[in-house]
């Protein structure tokens, strides 16, 4: 057996601890991405197989052909993120400052949906929005929906589904950052004759910015790549880039296009993250991810 | 309107908004639970047709559903075990040791969290296709470990960073070996963090659809079964099982709260106001 001095052993220990997990991530995360880059530059067809040909044209074609789905993904994700912020901020504010002894109960209710399958919750929205469902009938009664109008299979349904599914991701980081604010700062502002609105605008809001950024990113990233909501609550007219990648990969077997599309999607998102990291540092983000 | 009235109105509106938002989050969950009692005729479970307990009597009426749920639970257990073990050691390395490449490792571990699931799933399937690996149970486990490791690392790291290092130093000063300190002081102190990480990993694994759909091959899991049956109508047994899972989680959470309260009370009784950390230290040194 190799005999090492205590110091050498101590120096090796962190690599030993890190090694197995890092290896897993390299083999099943990094190498697949590199392989994906390789696949995206291949040409061929599903029957005869694909060969590597430096075919960058796939990227150009992919963007040209699926620009609608890309733009739609970003639109839907952006609208859903804003809706989550509008719904989630007052909710987080209420839980952090006004809920009193109901604070833990309300936090539990916010995370409760996580304990029911994501796909099943989306199916439940199908049930709520269905054409002859209670909600559609009531909306027809009061004239909010025309006789042949639909709730399901619309853009609104897909965006509502995404908003619903990612609302906790927005609310929790917002709550954490609001909770962390030293109340005395707000008191000091009001003591110095700032109105509640001014104190909110000049003290609370700026201090909540990390939570707003983190929540927005945690909502926006998964929302752009999502395809469950569009598949269950929409029609092909609402399909997002995730739906395209999925069907290219699993049904059409056009691997190069699917790979190119996922790279383009990832580039978008990495740019977003780098911008974020430049503004606030990744530490905040990983912390907020909890 | 006086200032005080305005304040009260503001609080009221905020409360109303909060309750509304919670309702928005809660309604689909309530519907799922409610429709597990629906006496539905035919395949569709879309409209309320009366109360029945029939589905609760035989939640596994469809053998395919039983297989799917069993697969999900077993995949969650196996992948959680692997991911928690690997991730805990990674967190220890990252928090406890200064070494070359630490911040790079930190960033690398963060990356999977920032990659959309559809990209993770597709890329992994691409690798399996290139390598001619047939997809199934094993590849699902591989995929789940890959994308839950980072969650484990972040969770355990948070716990380690919040821990007082002096307690470990004191144990070593009092003659405990490095290994003894780790087993008797460090491990018990970060145990809640590890447990939380494992729970998180299991919850993510059992619920995953996107990554699993790419790497499942012919293997069915609970979310895959639900998605697959969504077009022809999800059988009410799915609602029953989902409600059961929810009830189990809530029960575990309630037990945890009771247990923590009781332990806090016991600690206070035994050692006055001593924090839990020094208890672990006392025990470690007492055993030598």
Image: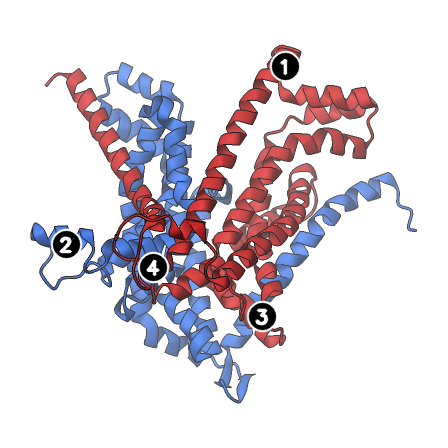
Chain colours: A blue, B red
The residue carrying mark 2 is: A137
Disc 3 versus disc 4: distance between alpha carbons? Answer: 25 Å
Q: Which circle marks residue B135 in the picture? A: 3
Q: Chain of mark 1?
A: B
Relative vertical location of residue B12 with respect to residue A6 in this rendering, above or below: above
Disc 4 versus disc 2: distance between alpha carbons? Answer: 23 Å
Q: Which circle marks residue A156 in the picture? A: none
Secondary structure under tag 2 reads helix
Q: Count the labels in the image.
A: 4
The residue carrying mark 1 is: B274
Image spot of residue A81 (x, y percent):
32, 49
Q: Between tags 4 and 2, which lies in front?
A: 2
The residue carrying mark 4 is: A229
Question: Which residue sits at x=29%, y=60%?
Answer: B41
Left or right of residue A105: residue B101: right
- Between residue B151 and residue B226, name the one nearer to us: B226
Task: Answer yes or no: is residue B72 visible.
Answer: yes
Residue at mark 3 shares a chain with residue at mark 4: no
Disc 3 versus disc 2: distance between alpha carbons? Answer: 45 Å
Disc 4 versus disc 1: distance between alpha carbons? Answer: 51 Å
Question: Which residue sits at x=30%, y=64%?
Answer: A71
Q: Say whether disc 4 or disc 2 marks the residue closer to the N-terminus.
A: 2
Relative vertical location of residue B127 with respect to residue B83 in this rendering, above or below: below
């Amino acid at each position: 057996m190799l005999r090492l001095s205590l110091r050498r052993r101590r120096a090796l220990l962190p690599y030993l601890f890190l090694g197995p997990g890092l290896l897993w991530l390299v083999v099943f995360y990094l190498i697949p991405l590199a392989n994906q880059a390789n696949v995206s530059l291949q040409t061929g067809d599903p029957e005869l197989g694909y060969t590597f040909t430096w075919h960058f044209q796939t990227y150009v074609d992919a963007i040209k052909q699926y620009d609608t789905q890309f733009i739609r993904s970003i639109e839907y994700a952006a609208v859903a993120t804003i809706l989550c912020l509008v719904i989630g901020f007052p909710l987080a504010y209420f839980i952090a400052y006004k809920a009193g002894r109901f604070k833990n109960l309300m936090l539990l209710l916010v995370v409760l949906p996580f304990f029911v399958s994501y796909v099943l919750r989306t199916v439940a929205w199908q049930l709520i929005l269905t054409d002859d469902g209670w909600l559609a009938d009531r909306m027809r009664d009061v004239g909010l929906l025309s006789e042949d109008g639909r709730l399901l299979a619309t853009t609104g349904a897909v965006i509502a589904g995404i908003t619903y599914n990612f609302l906790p991701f927005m609310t929790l980081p917002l709550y954490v950052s609001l909770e962390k604010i030293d109340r005395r700062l707000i008191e000091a502002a009001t003591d110095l004759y700032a109105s509640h609105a001014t104190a909110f605008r000049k003290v609370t809001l700026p201090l909540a910015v990390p939570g707003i950024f983190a929540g927005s990113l945690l909502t926006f990233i998964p929302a752009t790549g999502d395809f469950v909501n569009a598949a269950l609550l929409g029609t092909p007219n609402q399909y997002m880039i995730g739906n395209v990648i999925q069907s290219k990969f699993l049904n059409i077997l056009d691997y190069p296009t699917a790979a190119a599309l996922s790279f383009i999607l990832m580039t978008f998102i990495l740019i977003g993250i780098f911008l974020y990291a430049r503004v606030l540092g990744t530490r905040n983000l990983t912390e907020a991810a909890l | 309107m006086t200032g005080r009235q305005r304040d009260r109105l503001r609080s009221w509106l905020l409360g109303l908004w909060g309750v509304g938002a919670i309702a928005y989050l809660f309604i689909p969950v309530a519907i799922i639970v409610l429709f597990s009692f629906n006496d539905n005729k035919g395949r569709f479970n879309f409209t309320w047709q009366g109360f029945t307990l029939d589905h609760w009597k035989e939640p596994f009426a469809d053998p395919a559903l039983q297989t799917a749920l069993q697969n999900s639970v077993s995949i969650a257990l196996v992948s959680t075990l692997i991911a928690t073990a690997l991730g805990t050691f990674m967190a220890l390395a990252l928090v406890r040791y200064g070494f070359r490449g630490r911040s790079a490792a930190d960033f690398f571990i963060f990356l999977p969290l920032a990659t959309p699931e559809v990209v993770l799933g597709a890329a992994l399937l691409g690798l399996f296709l290139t390598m001619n690996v047939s997809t199934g149970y094993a590849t699902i486990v591989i995929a789940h470990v890959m994308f839950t490791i980072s969650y484990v690392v972040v969770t355990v790291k948070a716990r380690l960073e919040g821990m007082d290092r002096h307690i470990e130093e004191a144990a070593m000063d009092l003659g405990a070996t490095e290994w003894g300190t780790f087993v008797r002081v460090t491990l018990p102190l970060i145990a809640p963090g590890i447990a939380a990480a494992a729970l998180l990993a299991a919850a993510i694994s059992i619920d995953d659809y996107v990554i699993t759909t790419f790497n499942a091959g012919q293997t069915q899991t609970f979310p895959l079964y639900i998605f697959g049956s969504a077009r022809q109508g999800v059988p009410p047994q799915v609602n029953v099982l989902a409600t059961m899972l929810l009830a189990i989680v809530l029960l575990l959470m309630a037990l945890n709260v009771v247990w923590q309260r009781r332990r806090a009370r016991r600690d206070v009784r035994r050692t006055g106001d001593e924090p839990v950390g020094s208890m672990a230290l006392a025990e470690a040194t007492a055993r030598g």
